[in-house]
Image: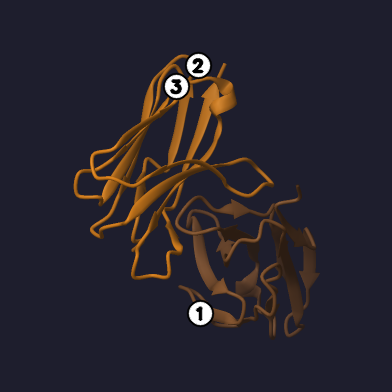
C-alpha cells in the first residue's frame, strides 16, 4: 500500500474537457508537490503547496491542498493535447529528512 | 546551466555484475537523492543525502550503496546486480523543502 494514493491511474479525454486528479493519504505532509513527466525524461516540478486549504493557479491548472494537509487535487480546465503526460504528486514529511514520497501517478492522454 | 546530469543514459548488466550510476549537480544544492521508477509504482526513494558526508537509507535501499564526498556528486553503486533491479533510476537535488530538480534518468536492464 502506497502512502500517497493517486486517482485515477489512467485518464483519456477529448481536447476541451475538464479533469481532476486526486492525491490522498492518511498521513500529514508539511508540503505537497505536483510534477509532470514526459517519456524519457525526469519529473518536472509544477507547483508546491504548503498551507492547509491553499489554492494555487498555473494558467489552466488549479492545485488545492486539503485543510488537514493530507490530500491534494489538480484540476485542469479545457485540456489540450500538450497536457498529455504522467502527473505525479509527492509529499514531504518533516520527520523523513524532507525527502519526497511519491504517489503512483496519473497517466493523462488528451486527444485532439 | 546543466542542472542534474546522470550518466549513463542506458546500461545492460549481467546478473552479479557491479556498476556505478553517476549523478552530478551544479546548483550547489545540499539535498540529493536517488529514486527508482517502476511501472505503476511511481518513484521510490533508494538513498538520500542532506549534505556532503551525510547519507541515509530510503524506502528500498537493499542492494545499493551511496557516498557523498562532495556537494556536487552523489554516485549510486549496485553491488551485485539482480534482475529485480531492472528499472529507471533518477537522481534529484534540492536546496531545501522547495522543488526538486531531476536528472533525465538511467534506464538499467539486468539480464
Check the picture and name the quadrant holding the N terminus of chain A: bottom left
Q: Are marks 3 and 1 on the same chain?
A: no
Decide if residue A58 is on the left or right side of residue A68: right
Name the secondary structure under disc 3. Answer: loop
Q: Relative to A47, say whether B39 is above or below.
A: below
Which mark, by number, is residue A15? 2
The percent coordinates of residue B24 (x first, y second) are 73, 64
Chain of the residue displaying label 1? B
Asked if the residue at tag 1 contacts the one at tag 3, i.e. Cβ–Cβ closer than 8 Å, the answer is: no
Chain of the residue displaying label 2? A
Disc nearer the start of the sequence (3/2) = 2
Q: Are marks 3 and 2 on the same chain?
A: yes
Name the secondary structure under disc 1. Answer: strand
The residue under label 1 is B56
The residue under label 3 is A60
- The chain that appears orange in the image is A
Q: Quadrant of residue A101?
A: bottom left
Q: Quadrant of residue B91?
A: bottom right
Q: Label 3 vs label 1: CA separation?
A: 39 Å
Q: Is residue B111 visible?
A: no
Name the secondary structure under disc 2. Answer: loop
Check the picture and name the quadrant holding the C terminus of chain A: top right
- The chain that appears brown in the image is B
Amino acid at each position: 500500500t502506497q502512502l500517497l494514493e493517486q486517482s485515477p491511474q489512467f485518464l483519456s479525454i477529448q481536447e476541451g474537457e475538464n479533469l481532476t486528479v486526486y492525491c490522498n493519504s492518511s498521513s500529514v505532509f508539511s508540503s505537497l508537490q505536483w510534477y509532470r513527466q514526459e517519456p524519457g525524461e525526469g519529473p518536472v516540478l509544477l507547483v508546491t503547496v504548503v498551507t492547509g486549504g491553499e489554492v494555487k493557479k498555473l494558467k489552466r491548472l488549479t492545485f488545492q491542498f486539503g485543510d488537514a494537509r493530507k490530500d491534494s487535487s489538480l484540476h485542469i480546465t479545457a485540456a489540450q493535447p500538450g497536457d498529455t503526460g504522467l502527473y505525479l504528486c509527492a509529499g514531504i514529511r518533516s520527520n523523513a529528512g524532507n525527502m519526497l514520497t511519491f504517489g503512483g501517478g496519473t497517466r493523462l492522454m488528451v486527444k485532439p | 546551466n546543466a542542472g542534474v546530469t546522470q550518466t549513463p543514459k542506458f546500461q545492460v548488466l549481467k546478473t552479479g555484475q557491479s556498476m556505478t550510476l553517476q549523478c552530478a549537480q551544479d546548483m550547489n544544492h545540499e539535498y540529493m537523492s536517488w529514486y527508482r521508477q517502476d511501472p505503476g509504482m511511481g518513484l521510490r526513494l533508494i538513498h538520500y543525502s542532506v549534505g556532503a558526508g551525510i547519507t541515509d537509507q530510503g524506502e528500498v535501499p537493499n542492494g545499493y550503496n551511496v557516498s557523498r564526498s562532495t556537494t556536487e556528486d552523489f554516485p549510486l553503486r549496485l553491488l551485485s546486480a539482480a534482475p529485480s533491479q531492472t528499472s529507471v533510476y533518477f537522481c534529484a537535488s534540492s536546496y531545501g523543502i522547495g522543488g526538486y530538480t531531476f536528472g533525465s534518468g538511467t534506464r538499467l536492464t539486468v539480464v
